[in-house]
Structure formats: structure tokens, C-alpha cells
Image (cartoon, rainbow, N blue to C red):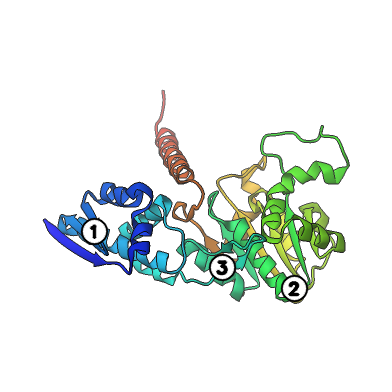
Amino acid sequence: MTERRITVQDSTQMQEICGSFDENIKALEKQYNVSIVCRGEEIKITGDEKSADSAESAIQAIMHMSDTGQLVNVQTVRYVTSMVDDGEADEIDSLTENGVCLTATGKVVRAKTVGQKKYVDAIKKNTIVFGVGPAGTGKTYLAVAMAVKAFKRHEVNRIILTRPAVEAGEKLGFLPGDLQNKVDPYLRPLYDALFEMLGAETFQKHMERGSIEVAPLAYMRGRTLDDAFIILDEAQNTTSEQLKMFLTRLGHQSKMVITGDTTQIDLPDKRKCGLLEAMKVLRHVEDIYIQEFTNKDVVRHKLVQDIIKAYEKYYNLKGESNASNKGKSFS
């Protein structure tokens, strides 16, 4: 058996590392099959050499996240252990104390994973950024946060958020009201993010002034979008023609962020997905960056990550089964 000892800064940090009712420590013990004892300002890890080393690396990474103001919980532990197991623990050091912006209630919005940090940095450095990955990875939320930050710093004069109005199995045409009332359900996630960043009153004020615009993608046709931060959400539901139209709306002193999840395409013909095509066509174009998130970047409830993994496994097995059946001949 191997023993490893780690000294923490103080009792406050020890409490953050252990978690409520030692839930973080229990998760680490289960993950690496080790015994972890926390006493005073020292953590003692006992287990076989490889497992003890992995648990030590995980705790060191958790300590770094605690130092940079990250919330440490069981979800954090899951993320850290996945990075350690993939040999990527050193990348966690790139997470810093700097937040993206403050919400209307004073909450600090910050990148919680390495993938999110790369995404935020890419938005700062590039004119067009694609954020592609599963649900819950913060693609839209962080894009809106970066838009609000740029708007408050007067780097842009307006924020434009748009989505394609493609139904995900539901029919909304029977709803009462004018066109705006009918498309509002599609745009609700964008409203929610802006409400949190700005507050409902400030958001409404900027909407009335025209400095914030939330509209369906069809409204973008024929326009030139200068001095704006433009976000296209749910881009997996754009056709090739629609996404090309949107990208060519880019004007002077503007930025674009395109987000989407290629596993949730609601188009009748998935082969015509504009996002998949754009990722191939534009991958090597200068000043365009494509950030691909994985299930490790999921920051919603821990079950969301498990659901995504389960579906990936199911579809992979289904694909292998279909491939093997095609290879058989029946007489």
C-alpha cells in the first residue's frame, strides 16, 4: 500500500475540498478505490501506488479550482477525475480567477472547464467562433456573457441573437398572436440568458432602444450587421444556404458566435445540416475558430453527462450493428 499526504491552506479550503457531508471525498474514494482521511489541515491518501497518485493529482487540481474561485462540488470532482484519467490534469491550471462578467445579481460568470476556457479565449481573439457540443456545456450562456461584456465595454453598439425557427417535434403554428408571439418560444433560451446577465428592466430598455435584438434567423436576410456582437444559436437546424446567408451578414467591427449540437438535428433531411458543412469548409480559414465540446464540459446536473454518455454508447452500438448487418447476405 502507498500513502500520500497533502497539506491544505486552512480549514475553509479543507471544507470546500471535502464537500457537504464529505461527499467530494467519498466520490474520490469510490472513483480510485482508495482511503482518504482529512484531519486538521492534512489529507492522507492510502491505496495502491497508481490509484493514490491519481487521487493526489485530483485533489491538487481541486485545490487549484478552489483557489481560483470555482465552486467545488461532486460535479467538479467528476470533471477533475475525468481529466486526470485522460492525462489532462495539467490543463486545469489554465483555469483562472478572472470571470467573464457579472450577472445582474452580482454572480461571477466564469469558465468552469478547460473546454469553456478555450471557447472564451477564442471569442476574444477571433472574429467568428463556432461552439459545437452536447447540451449543458455552456455554449450559448458563455456566448451571451461575452456579448454583454463587449456591449458594456462599448466594443460593440448592439447585441443580435438569433435562432432558426425549426420545430423539435412540436407544432406551434396554432398558437395565438402575431408572428413575434409565435416565434418567441424558439427564442426563450436567449431571453433567459439576457435576463440573467442584465436584469429584466435593463434588458427591456435596450430592446426598446434597438441596441439588443432577438429575432428568428429569417429576419437576417439582406442585412449587413456592423458594430455588433451576433450569436446564432441552435445552428444544427440551419440548412447550408441559411448558414451561408448568416455568415455573410458579417459587417465591420463585428463578432459572430455560432453554437449548436450536431446530435440534436431537427431538420427533415439531416444531410443538409449547414453546421456540419460549415465545420468542414471553414475549419482552416484564418480568424475562424471551432471549439468542439465533449461530455466532460457538461456543467448542468451530473445526470446530464450520464445521459449524453448513455446515448453515445447506444448510437455507437446501433451503428456497429447496422454495419455488420449490411455486410451479411441473405438467401
Q: Which residue is drawn at 30% across and 67% down?
A: 8
Q: What residue type is labelled 3?
A: Val
Query: Mark 2: few, some, or many residues within 10 Å (few <14, many ≥20)?
Result: many
Q: What's the mark number on residue 39?
A: 1
Q: Distance between the residues labelled 2 and 3?
A: 17 Å
- The image quadrant of residue 324 is top left
Q: What residue type is labelled 2?
A: Val
Q: Can residue 239 be seen in this view?
A: no
Asked which secondary structure carries label 3, the reply is helix
Query: Mark 3: few, some, or many residues within 10 Å (few <14, many ≥20)?
Result: many
Position above or below: 312 against 122: above
- The image quadrant of residue 219 is bottom right
Give the residue at mark 2. 156
Give the residue at mark 3. 120
* Sequence-first disc among 3 and 1: 1
Q: Which residue is drawn at 77% across and 59% down?
A: 203
Q: Can residue 72 be seen in this view?
A: yes
Q: Distance between the residues labelled 3 and 1?
A: 38 Å
Residue 250, image x, y percentages: 75, 69
Q: In this view, does 59 lie to the left or right of 202?
A: left
User: Dividing the image into 4 quarters, which one contains the N terminus?
Assistant: bottom left
Q: Distance between the residues labelled 2 and 1?
A: 52 Å
Residue 230, image x, y percentages: 72, 64
Asked which secondary structure carries label 1, the reply is strand
- The image quadrant of residue 256 is bottom right
Position above or below: 69 against 38: below
Q: What residue type is labelled 1?
A: Arg
Q: Residue at x 42, y 57 (%)?
A: 72
Residue pushed farthest top? 331
